[in-house]
Image (spheres, rainbow, N blue to C red):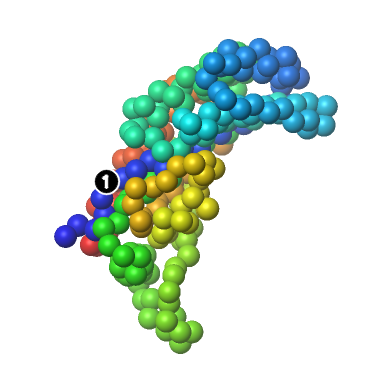
Amino acid sequence: MTHLKDYFIKKIIIGVDHKPNFLHTEKARKSLNNFIEKYNHASVKKIGAEESYEIKNEHEYWKFFAEWNHFGFEMENSLDFESAESTCKTFLSHYSNDIGISIYSRVGIRVIFLFPFNGTFEELLKFYNNNMYKNVEIYNSFGDIDDAGIIVLTAHDKKYKMNLSFGPFAKGEIKSKISDFKNYDEKFDNSFMVDIDLFQDKPQKYVLNTYISETLNAARVKVLKFKSTLKE
């Protein structure tokens, strides 16, 4: 029996850093006002002489935020990459064009995948330990292990720098530790979490729509290759 089911895209976080924009307040207000029919909550906060903005839709599980040197988008509970990609592009490319900055110092996309686990949490923990720890018995002197924490790694390939983390999650932990939208309930009790953060931090021109497409696809390919190496 296969324990891991197909992945669920729990969360996508996209962040873009750029030089401070002294026309931020004027341009951000005008740009975000174009989305007035899409959000049901908005907030403005003072950061020194500048303002930061956040708009969100709590029923569609997304939020957009902007400061004078940073903007980004988060969404949760996406059914597939195609719809997630389309939603991200709608907000980010529109805002990017409106503020008129083409050189970005860092662009990162983080995707949190959940693989629903067909079994008890104790079975999930055993699966996790067998795959992520070579010799979990070294901890037996402390007592019987009831849970395991998240493993965190850094890595790189030819294009991206990466932050990676993995961990076993019970249903309640997903809402308390991962989700910003507490009105969503998972349909599965236990899951194996893979969190992959891909970024580039060399200042350069980015075509955001292209970057979003390429990076989301890279995250998907990498996580599926990783899953294929796990022992059931």
Asked whether residue 206 appears in the rendered view, the answer is yes
Q: Which part of the image, by quadrant, shows the N terminus?
A: bottom left
Residue 26 x/y as whole percent: 72, 14
Callout 1 amino acid: Asp
Q: Nearer the viewer, residue 220 or 5?
A: 5
Res. 24 image quadrant: top right
Res. 215 image quadrant: top left
Compared with 208, 1 (above or below) is: below
**Residue drawn at (78%, 26%), measured in percent from left and top?**
50
Question: What kind of element bears circle 1?
Answer: loop
Residue 122 x/y as whole percent: 34, 69
**Residue drawn at (46%, 26%), measured in percent from left and top?**
88
**Residue drawn at (36%, 76%), measured in percent from left and top?**
135
**Residue drawn at (30%, 68%), measured in percent from left and top?**
123
Residue 32 x/y as whole percent: 61, 18
Horizontal side, residue 28 vs residue 190: left or right: right
Q: How many marks?
A: 1
Horizontal side, residue 124 vs residue 182: left or right: left
Q: Which part of the image, by quadrant, shows the C terminus?
A: bottom left
Residue lying at the far bottom of the rendered structure = 141
Q: Nearer the viewer, residue 19 or 171?
A: 171
Circle 1 packing at 10 Å, graded few (<14), some (14-19), many (20+), is: few
Compared with 157, 23 (above or below) is: above
Compared with 184, 227 (above or below) is: below
Horizontal side, residue 99 vs residue 133: left or right: right
> Which residue, given by chain and number where applicable, does mark 1 sit on?
6
